[in-house]
Image: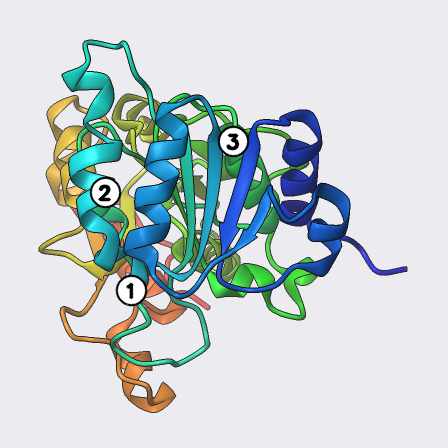
């Protein structure tokens, strides 16, 4: 028996429960058209600026629209309706208007489509006031965040890794027990542990879980934290999770200079959740994504990078306290 992808179930449920929900996409979905009709399942040309502009207009007159674009890179052509219209109407109208709009877009994940298609844009998009930016790390979290987005009164962008839809998606690490709706701005504990904490977002959550298994061979019990949303960013919740749970490694595919995890790291230090010398970053390189897998691999965080940073922090900690570390003993 083939298991239905939880995101497909979330979309069908929302379309069934919300008769005012419409979906724009650039690809054909015959099963959904049969169920909900061509007036609600609208196939459009590859013109994201027009798609988002139309969706904003519909949302302003009481409809809800789910815009499914193939790549988040294509959203850049629609920045005027997204940034200057969708996210500004509630503010400029003093709450008289809202724009219940959801945009889904694929980011990066083992497809090797090159610099114009592979982007991890969560930090950049998180700088737009009025926009929620959800970054699921697993199939269930994608369904849970999308379900919440489709009930949200304001614009939401859901950034999904292609890995979540690979043929072996059911075998991916799954920190969420169910595809139930997940609240925005609430970080989750993907794995319990008290010796050190690995914090990830999107693709790097699975990376942290794999690194935690490796670090268990060194006698270290790792906690893994999934931020879930880039905006709102759960700074205080993350601080509460990492406090008392050892050193912290923040892991992001985006370059460190633009990573929102730098903002998070500063907050963790300022509120006393972690000492500055017990904090490390593992980030991607500030280089456009090459199409070659061989060239791309060194530019992204790896399990070895995370494990190395974690072991360096734990060794430093034991050296500072005069203890004997078990890290690196295997």
Q: Which mark is residue 119?
A: 1
Sequence-wise, which precedes: disc 2 or disc 1?
2
Q: Secondary structure at mark 3?
A: loop
Separation (CA) of disc 1 from disc 3:
24 Å
Which of the 4 quarters of the picture holds residue 92? top left
From the viewer's perspective, is the residue at label 1 or at label 3 nearer? 3
Residue in the foreground of this view, choosing between 266 and 227: 227
Q: Secondary structure at mark 1?
A: loop
Q: Where residue 321 sits in the image (x, y, percent)?
A: 20, 40
Residue in the foreground of this view, choosing between 112 and 89: 89
Q: Are marks 2 and 1 in contact (CB under 8 Å)?
A: no
Q: Is residue 189 left or right of residue 50?
A: right
Q: Is residue 77 left or right of residue 22?
A: left
Sequence-wise, which precedes: disc 1 or disc 3?
1
Residue occupying image coordinates x 37% and y 86%? 293
Q: Which mark is residue 150?
A: 3
Residue 124 in sight here: no
Residue on which disc 2 sits: 81
From the viewer's perspective, is the residue at label 2 or at label 3 nearer? 2
Q: Where residue 277 sits in the image (x, y, percent)?
A: 13, 44
* Residues packed near mark 1 inside 10 Å, few (<14), some (14 to 19) or many (20 plus): many
Residue occupying image coordinates x 28% and y 48%? 122
Q: Where residue 39 sits in the image (x, y, percent)?
A: 60, 43
Residue in the foreground of this view, choosing between 198 and 218: 198
Q: Are marks 2 and 3 in contact (CB under 8 Å)?
A: no
Separation (CA) of disc 2 from disc 3:
19 Å
């Amino acid at each position: 028996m083939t298991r239905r992808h939880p995101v497909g179930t979330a979309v069908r449920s929302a379309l069934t429960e919300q008769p005012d929900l419409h979906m724009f996409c650039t690809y054909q979905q015959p099963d959904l058209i049969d169920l909900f009709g061509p007036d609600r399942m609208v196939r459009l040309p590859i013109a994201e600026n027009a798609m988002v502009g139309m969706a904003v207009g519909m949302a302003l007159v009481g409809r809800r629209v789910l815009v499914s674009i193939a790549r988040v890179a294509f959203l850049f052509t629609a920045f005027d309706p997204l940034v200057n219209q969708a996210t500004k109407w509630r503010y400029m109208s003093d709450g008289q208007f809202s724009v219940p709009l959801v945009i889904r877009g694929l980011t990066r994940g083992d497809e090797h489509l090159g610099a114009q298609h592979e982007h991890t844009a969560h930090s950049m998009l998180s700088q737009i006031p009025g926009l929620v930016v959800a970054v699921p790390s697993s199939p269930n979290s994608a369904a849970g965040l999308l379900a919440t987005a489709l009930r949200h009164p304001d614009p939401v962008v859901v950034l999904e890794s292609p890995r979540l839809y690979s043929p072996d998606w059911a075998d991916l690490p799954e920190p969420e027990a169910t595809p139930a709706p997940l609240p925005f701005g609430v970080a989750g504990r993907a794995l319990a542990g008290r010796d050190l904490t690995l914090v990830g977002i999107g693709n790097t959550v699975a990376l942290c879980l794999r690194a935690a298994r490796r670090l268990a061979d060194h006698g270290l019990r790792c906690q893994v934290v999934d931020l879930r949303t880039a905006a709102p960013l759960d700074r205080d919740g993350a601080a509460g999770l990492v406090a008392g749970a050892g050193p912290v490694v923040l892991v992001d595919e985006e370059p460190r200079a633009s990573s929102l995890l730098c903002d998070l790291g500063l907050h963790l230090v300022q509120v006393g959740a972690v000492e500055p010398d017990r904090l490390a970053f593992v980030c991607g390189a500030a280089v456009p994504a090459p199409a070659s897998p061989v060239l791309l691999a060194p530019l992204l965080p790896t399990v070895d990078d995370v494990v190395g940073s974690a072991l360096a922090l734990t060794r430093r900690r034991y050296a500072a306290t005069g203890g004997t570390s078990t890290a690196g003993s295997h």
